[in-house]
Image: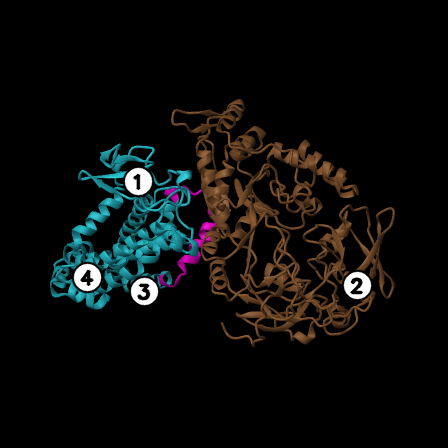
Amino acid sequence: MQAAPAMRTPIRGGRLVIAQKAEPKTLNPLLSRDIPSREVLGCLSADLISIDRQTQTAEPVLAESWRVSPDGLHYTIKLRPGLHFSDGQPFDADDVVFSFTVFLDDKVHAVQRDPLIINGKLITVVKLDARTVRVDLPALYAPAERIFDSVPMLPRHLLERPYRDGKLSQVWNLNTKPESMAGMGPFRVKEYKAGEHILLERNPYYWKPHQPYLDELEFLFVGDEDAQIARFVSGETDILNRVSARNVGLLRARGMIVQDLGPSLEYNVLVFNLTPQASPAAKEWFQQKAFRQAVSAAIDRDSIVQLVYGGLASPLSGHVSPGNRAWVNANLPAAKQSLDRAKQLLKNSGFTWNDQGELHDRTGRRVEFTIATAASSQERSAMAPLVQDDLKKLGMKVEIASLEFRSMVDRVLNTHQYDTAIMGLGGGDPDPEFESNVWRSDGGMHIWNPGETSPGSAWEAEIDKLMTEQAVERSYPKRRKLYDQVQQIIADEVPIICLASPHVLVAARPHVQNFRPVIFDHYTLWNVDELFIQQPKAKEQPTAR
Amino acid sequence: MIRPLMLCAAVILLCAPFFAPYSEDEQNRSRAQENPTHIHIRGARPVIIEGGQTYPIRFFTNGHFFGISTPARIFLFGSDEYGRDVFSRFLFGGRVSVAGGIVATLLALTLGLSIGAAAGLGFRWLDELLMRTTELFLSLPWLYLLLALRAILPLQLSTTAAFWLVTAVIALSGWPRPARLIRGMVLSAKERPYVQVARSLGASPSYLFRHHILPQLRGLLWAQALLILPQFVLADMALSFLGLGAGEPSASWGGMLAALRHFSVLESHIGHWAPALLMVCFFLGMQLLNRRQPSPTSVKISGTIQ
C-alpha cells in the first residue's frame, strides 16, 4: 500500500472525468440497486452519519453530533445548523423523519430498508425539535452507528406528494429535469445525455464550506474495462476506479501510476452444494468434512494468485480478507497446498484409487462433479481450470460449466441444481454483522444451504449462536473474539473453500490531487468533495465523444 | 497446389495427438505466458537453448511427431495463462472444429438430400409440408435456442456430449438451404425425357432417384459440401467463442480467439496471434478450394449458388 500524498492547497475549478461500465438505471435513491446508479447517487446525496472510509469509524456528516443512551437503544442526533438542499430549500428534522418513513415503508421496497430492520423489527425515528431527532432501536445492536451509512436524506418538499400518491418509484429517473431533483451531496445533476454521459455540477449549498473544489464531475458511459483503459491512456478520463490485474502491466508500461491498495474486502470461494437437492453422489461426498478438507488441501492458492491475478491478490485461509484488518483472524494457519494431506484425508474416509489413478468412493463410484462459474467473471472463470487441474491430481474428474451470471446465482440460491460453484462474496461494509446473512442458517445468502430455517448441523448452530452474541456485544475486543471463532469454524468445516482476495488497483492522472483511494467502496470517489485538479481545465461544453 | 495443402492441413488437424508435442491440458504453471520458443540450428539440427543447456528437437519421439527432453519445453506459439502449449491446443482445437464441421456437413447434407428429394419426388402436399418446415427452420434463431438449451441441460455435459450437441445444432440449422437446392434440381431432373421414359416403363420412384436423378446431384452435393464446411467450422468456432460447446480444459478455436478480446492479451503476447492467422489461412484455403472445384456442372451450379 502506498502512503497518502501530502496535502496541497486546494484549487477550485475544473472537471473530473470518470468512466462507468454501464449507464445508471435510475437517479432515485430508493431504487438504486446497480453499481453505476449508486456511484452517481453517492455524489448527489449525504447521510446523517457515515463510516469514514480510511479510519473505518463513524463520523458526523449532516449530523453535528449524536448521543447514545446508556442502554444503547436510543440515538439522539443533532443536525448541523443552516443546512440546505441543492435547490436552496432548508433541510431540517422533518426531512430526516420523512426520509426514514419512506425507507421503512414496506410498500416502497426501498433498498435501504433491510439494514434498518433489527431482529425482525423496524427502527423508529422521532422528531424532538427542528434540529434534533431520536432514533430508537428495537433491540441492542452493536454496529448501530453503521446503519446510517449510505442512507441518504431525501427532500420532503419534493418527494412528499409523490409518496402520498404512491408514485415515488416513478420519480427521479434519468430523464427527470435536474431542477426537479435535490440532494445534500457535494454535486447536483446538470445534464444527462443517453449513451454519452451524466454531468454533475458543484452544489452551491453543500454543507462543507468552500467544497467541493471541482466545478464539475462527469461520468462517461464507456462499457467494458478494455475501453475504459483505452480512454484513460488517451487522457479522456482522469480516474480508473478499479483496474483488473491483467491490465496493470499495460498501464505501467505506458507510464501510468497504478496504485496497489492491497487486498480488497472481496473474497472468491468454491462453495459446496450442501442442500438436500444436491445429486445423491455429490451429497454423500460433500457432506463428509474430510472430503471438503481434502479438496481444500489440494487447491494451490498461490497459483491462483500468480496466474489469475499476476501476484496482485492474497491467498486466503479464511473468509475474511487480510485487507479487513479490524476483523481478520490472523491466527488461522495459512492454507498451503498439500496433496499428501489431501490423499490421506480421502484414504481415511474410505476413498480408493484404481490403477489409472481415478478416485472412487467406498461404493465404487468414480468421484466426479462440476464446478459452475459465471462466464462474465473473467477471473473466476480463469480460476476454474486451475482448481480442475489440482483436483485431477487427486484422481477426481471435474467438469467446468460456464453459465450466465443470473443463471448461476439462480442455481446456487434457488434451484440448487449444481455441484460446486466459484463465486465472489464480500466487498461491502467490513463489519461482520453486515455479512451475517451468509453465516446465519436462516440468512438469505447462506450459500451452501440456502433456505434452511434452522441449523442443519452442530457447527452451524454454533455459528448462529456466535453471530447472535456478536451482534449485541458492544465491546469491540469481545466482538472480535466471537467473530474469530466463527472464522475458525468456517475454516475447519469448509462449507466454502476460500481461495483468494483480489487487490484493489486504481489509477489517477497526476493532476488529480487529494487522491486517497481506499479499499472500502467507493474506492476513488469516497472523498470526491476533497478532490481537486492541479491545473484546472477550462470549463468546456460537453461534446459528443 | 491448394488441394494437397488443404488435405495436409486436414490430416494434421485430425491427427492432432500425434503432431502436437503436448496434450491440450498439460499445465506448466511456472511457464505461463511465455513467448514462442527460439529455435536454433546447430550442425544442421534444430535445437533449443535453455538455461545454458542445448536440447535437440527430436522427431518421431514418444508417440509424437516431434518433441524435446524435459525440463526443456518447446512452445512454437508460446504458452497460455496456465503454461499450456498454444500450438498443441491449436491442433487439438482444430481437430474438434474441423471434425465437428465435417460431421455437421455430412448430417446437414444427408438431411437436406432426404428432405429435398422427398419434396421433389413426392406428392404436392408433401412438397408443401416439407418446404414450409424448411422455412420454419430457416427462421429460427439458433444461437438463442442453443443458449436456452444449454441453460436447461444438466451442468455435467461431457466433452463428447457437448461436441454432439453443438454439431447437431449446426446441422439442424444448416440443412434447409441444401434441401431447397436439391428439391429444385430434383423437380427439374424428373421432367427430363429419359426419366419420363423410365417412369412410363414402370420404374419406381426410388429406382428413378438412384439411377437417374442422384447422379445429377453429385456435383451439387460436392459444391455444397465445400461451401458449407467452412461455414460450419466457423459456426462451431462462434459457439465456442461464446462459451458453448466443450468446456475447459478442452481446446477450441473459438475459445482461443476469445482470449484475444482483451486489450492486454492483444498487446503483449504475440504467440496468441498465430492461431488466429492460421485460422484465416485455413478459411482462405477452403474458399480457394471451392472456387477451383473442377466438376463439369460447377459452372452452372456456381452461377446459381453464388
Question: Can residue B191 be seen in the rendering of this structure?
Answer: no
Pick whichever of labels 1 and 3 is earlier in the sequence: 1
Q: Same chain for the residues at labels 3 and 2, yes or no?
A: no
Figure quadrant of residue B24: top left
What residue is shown at x 26% (from left), y 54% (from top)?
B282
Q: Position of residue B26 (x, y in %)?
A: 37, 38
Q: Secondary structure at mark 3?
A: helix
Query: Magenta part of the protein: which range?
Result: B138-161
What residue is shown at x 14% (from left), y 65% (from top)?
B192
Q: Secondary structure at mark 1?
A: loop
Amino acid type assigned to the residue bearing label 1 in the image: Ile
Camera-nearest residue between A31 and B194: A31
Marks 3 and 2, Cα distance to the nearest angstrom? 72 Å
Horizontal side, residue A288 vs residue B10: left or right: right
Above/below status of A331 relative to A197 = above
Foreground mark, 4 or 3? Answer: 4
Secondary structure that dominates the magenta span: helix
Question: Which residue is labeled 3 in the image?
Answer: B128
What shade does chain B have?
cyan
Question: Which residue is labeled 2 in the image?
Answer: A96
Marks 2 and 1, Cα distance to the nearest angstrom? 69 Å
Q: Secondary structure at mark 4?
A: helix
Q: Same chain for the residues at labels 1 and 4, yes or no?
A: yes
Marks 4 and 2, Cα distance to the nearest angstrom? 77 Å
Amino acid type assigned to the residue bearing label 3 in the image: Glu
